[in-house]
Image: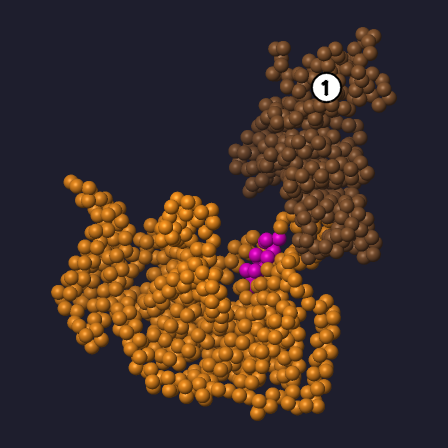
Amino acid sequence: MNRTAKRTLRSARLAWPWLVLIIISAILILLRDSYPQIIAYPDGLTLPLADWVNVGADWFIAHAQSFFRALAEGLGFAFILVQNILTGLPWLTLALIVALVAWQGGGNRLAALSVAGLLYVLISGYWVQTMNTLSLVVVALPLAVILGFAFGYLGYRSKAARKIIMPVLDLMQTIPAFAYLIPILLLFGFGPVVGLVASVIFAAPPMVRNTVLGFQSIPPAILESARMSGCTGWQRFLWAELPTAWRQMLIGINQTTMATLSMIIIAAIIGGFEDIGWEVLSSMRKAQFGQSLMSGLVIVVLAILLDRITSAYAARQLPTASFAGLPTLHFFGLIVVVTGLSIAASYVIPGLWRWPEWAVWSPAQDINKWTETFLIRYGSAMDTLKNTATYFVLLPVKIGLEKAIVPFTWGVTFVPAAKTAYWAIATLFCLVAFALGAWRLGIALIIGLAFLYFGATGLPWVSVLGFAMLLAYQLGGWRLAAFVGGSTAYLLVNGIWQQAMLSVYLCSVAVLICIVFGGLLGIWGASSKWASNVIRPINDMLQTLPQFVLLIPALMLFQVGEFTALLAIVAYAIVPMVRYTEFGLRSVSPTLIDAGISSGCSPWQLFWQVRLPQALPQILIGMNQTVLYALGMLVIAALVGTTGLGQLIFLALGRADAGAGLVAGLGMALLAMTVDRILQAVVRRM
Amino acid sequence: MPESSNAAAAKVAPKKAKLSVRNLWKVYGTDPEGVTSGGFAEMPLERKLSHVRDADHFVAAADVSFDVAEGEIFVIMGLSGSGKSTVLRCLSRLVEPTKGEVFLDGEDLLKANPRGLIELRRHKMGMVFQDFGLLPHLDVVQNVAFPLKAQRRPREERRALAREMIELVGLKGKESSYPHELSGGQQQRVGIARSLAANPELWFLDEPFSALDPLIRSQMQDEFLRLQKQLLKTIIFVTHDFLEALKLADRICIMKDGQIVQIGTPAEIVLHPADAYVREFIGDVPLANVLAAEDVMAPAHEDGKDHPQVQRRTILDEAIKLFDDNTVTVDVVDDDGHVVGALHPLAVIRALYHDDIVADI
């Protein structure tokens, strides 16, 4: 027997569980026409989990609703109070206060940025809506911060509490926020308060995390020196722990602020009033892209200002910070004086109180016209792009080449001879890989090609379950396999398999695009300082923007549909891939690079053999984040007409069906956690 | 071995002990109390150790006993993991000992209630840490005044006291700097000033100079000795640096695996190492700089001749310069000029090159 044959046999011996599964899958697929339940999970085997949840929820609501409604009243009162203040005060006063707060945090540049941002809001005519949104933020933020701090400090003090809090946080951050909007809706009734409560719950986790982190990273010597100085427990907390953890907590406040804003905007979907999120949403629904773009930009301004101001206060805590601002008492004195003076001035000159109509200028109508002209002129080109992507990329992944290749779109028929050739080539590739000893590559090739042939929705569920568990077992042992098997089974028995596979399909295309283009952008950023300087602010902006603003430009150009959703998902999820690739490549130790160069590596070899392998763990973390981001964006993208779990959640939201919403939401969370754990197992094995 | 040296230590300990540690144990694990109760007290030490380890518990300090006299510099020396820092932390109850007694002026510290413990720390103890433990948001004066703030002393009083301390440690002019603006050596001076601010009787130093550059470290050691001459605190000083221990200590306590290996003055340890472990440390020591004439002298040599004289605390490195072709005896004299002993070349060689090497000469 020659060596090639020996190696092939050895590969086959190592890959036997995979080969067995492949053969079983092939048999299942051959039988699928006579037994449709091979592809579609039989309805008879589902559990009515959603109904049970609803029964439980109904019981709970019946008993607890009065309490929560009372709470809603209280929150509603606080909100109306703040709203009246913010919309009642002269714009001049508010603008000056914001500018002063910005200056105190970050000096002249930040103050100038704030003034410019607020001027945009005034001129575009969205001042009142912005103040309404801001009122919600002002009420929700302190609640989220206090709640987050309380749980964070509890987690720091008690190990038992931490063991409960941390997994709950993980779960909360992977379940799409919409899923838990529904129970809140049922408990609190409709109206702005729902958004308020939802954003408190949604925004508290980063505060919890940063509080725990801040307190845990206090140097032990500081704690001991405080004890040795004779501090009582309370003195130690107030004078040593809190000030030392303060900067990390301010970082938490920054993240919590952004999450609050983002959730308040999103909550417009379930019950907008005259806030800026509703403005964007309703103009988007009316296809008034000029208006939605202008109001979307207001959200961008709001997000950037809140982000920069809160992070400036966190940065100011660094011991090396150069800017200190005024002493606190002087600062507040100044605020009081400025407020008084500006109110007095506004009494005299009414234009300082209400922004005059004649000073409002919005190019929304013009943008609508330009878009129209653009679409008339380049519409066919855009359609070609969209159709090409849909027919040659999206559809094959969704329903498989087998069904996607039709004369109408591809111009050819997938004749049996071509199908035979396809499988022959797949088998040949696999055999070659086996002969080279790379059995993993061979198996991956054949599974990938089969996936492309049958599509995400045409695979037997037994095979998906089997392959997922086998992969998990080989990567992370029985525990991981059990988790993956359990998650898959959850999707099956709840009867949301079809939708889950649709979500998998859209996500996997988006993630693939992100990995390729994000990876390339990351490499480019790592290779040139100039490129890095261009890429970074764009990344910052994409990440600061409330997610559904990303839908606007895509929607303007490509109308409702999966391609539009895909673009929005890619725009959002590509950021971590770019960031981590660049970071990973940049943080390869210079010694290793020197060693590579002195070993005589060409630049090409240096990249492939030194820098890339060293950066790979970071890149994998980036990939992991990208998957999580893509799944998170999927729900928002359902607004522009995708199918899958995101759509299920939306439908449940419309019907106020807590059970269905939670089941689908948990399904998405399990998908995300499965991918997360598998990728982490890969990182651990490296 | 450890037991006998412990017993020896208790015997030779000065009569007036400021701080006495008796049979101190610190055991880590799931149930340290349970493991060290029952028949534990009756077991011999070796049994105790194996008993605790068999129960999957970790012994950080095993049956540690020593006395520290008022005004003494007592150095606990050991490698990392030897339990030296644990013992120090047990004395201030930053770590709660599992078993044992710690007497300060005859009163058991381990019986103090939480409130009493805070009072003890406020008035009786000061501590310096390896990585300083300065509060980053406070300036130098505020850091030094921190223990006084905890005592709720009036603001002006505590600032005045803090300024005094800052001057004492040679940081005048840096009062309003923040820790990140200071060098490591300066930061540790702040740490020292803070530990002394409340005028404690006990001064604990946990590897205070280990994080500093060698040159700065040596300066700080001199500074430390100067301060102690002025202040006369009762000091427990922890270090992993044997040379530092020799330079600073009145007595050294060498620890290994949570147990005391030997307690003695620097000269005792260098001349009579308790075992091979201690001997290994001595290997690199420039003995001529550590040992003094009195450490190796023989009884006075009464032959009626005049011999060159050397002061009893002169280090050998200096004393041996007096030997020449005609001089084989040097008289050792005390501060009043009385001859108290004689120095012979062979004794000096024996001491410098360790007994075992020159035993056959």
Q: Nearer the viewer, residue A273 or B334?
A: B334
Q: Is residue B250 magenta?
A: no
Chain hosting mark 1:
B
Q: Residue at x 72, y 75 (%)?
A: A334
Question: What colour scheme was applied to this rendering of the protein?
Answer: by chain
Q: Residue at x 28, y 55 (%)?
A: A444
x%, y% of residue A13?
A: 23, 45
Does residue A614 sit above or below A644 in this rendering?
A: above
- Image quadrant assignment for residue A204: bottom right
Q: Residue furthest bottom?
A: A358
Give the SS element for disc 1.
helix
x%, y% of residue A173?
A: 47, 64
Side of A587 relative to A161 (left or right): left
Q: Is residue A123 visible?
A: yes
Give the colour in which the image draws chain B: brown
Give the colour in which the image draws chain A: orange
Side of B8 relative to A62 (left or right): right
Q: Report the magenta stretch's main SS.
A: helix
Q: Is residue A216 magenta?
A: yes
Which residues, given as a range, are shown in magenta? Answer: A207-218
Does residue B92 sit above or below A105 in this rendering?
A: above
x%, y% of residue A629?
A: 43, 66
Side of A400 relative to B26 (left or right): left
Quarter of the image for the N terminus of chain B: give it. Answer: top right
Q: Residue at x 51, y 87 (%)?
A: A362
x%, y% of residue A237?
A: 67, 56
Q: Residue at x 52, y 79 (%)?
A: A298
Q: Which residue is mark 1?
A: B320
